[in-house]
Image (cartoon, rainbow, N blue to C red):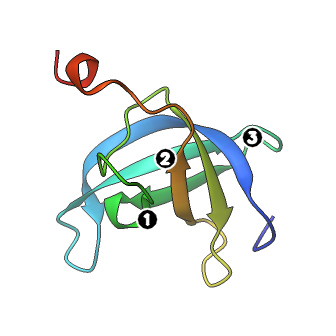
Amino acid sequence: MSGGGPRQGTIVDRRPSGGGQSGALGSYIIRDDEDERYYGFDYRQIVTEGFRTVRTGERVRFHVSAESPDRAEFVIRLDQPEAAEYYR
């Protein structure tokens, strides 16, 4: 699936480096709920009003990049954690 409307998935992996032009940014992997394909992204693609990060196991909504069909963009967390719980 490339381009198209919003998808839903689960964060299944976080890698401490590999994203961004220099490869120094952390990168994440989403498994699409519908077709079970995997998509990568880095923190710059997270759309949020709060924390600009996600954790493994969290559910997200995203779009597949039209330029790179293995990349996710406009990633939105579906379940926002409580701040006190997040920092435990």
- Kind of residue indicated by mark 1: Gln
Q: Residue at x 35, y 41 (%)?
A: 14
Q: Residue at x 74, y 52 (%)?
A: 7
Instruction: Return the mark for residue 45.
Output: 1
Identify the residue under disc 3.
36
Number of labels in the image equals: 3
Q: Secondary structure at mark 3?
A: loop
Q: Residue at x 41, y 49 (%)?
A: 28
Q: In 3D space, how far apart are the residues under numbered discs 3 and 2 (Cα atoms)?
A: 12 Å
Q: Secondary structure at mark 2?
A: strand
> Pointers 1 and 3 in contact (CB under 8 A)?
no
Identify the residue under disc 2.
29
Q: Is residue 3 above or below residue 75?
A: below
- How packed is label 2: few (under 14 Cα within 10 Å), some, or many (20 or more)? many
Q: In 3D space, how far apart are the residues under numbered discs 1 and 2 (Cα atoms)?
A: 12 Å
Q: Position of residue 60 (x, y in %)?
A: 58, 42
Q: Secondary structure at mark 1?
A: helix
> Pointers 1 and 2 in contact (CB under 8 A)?
no
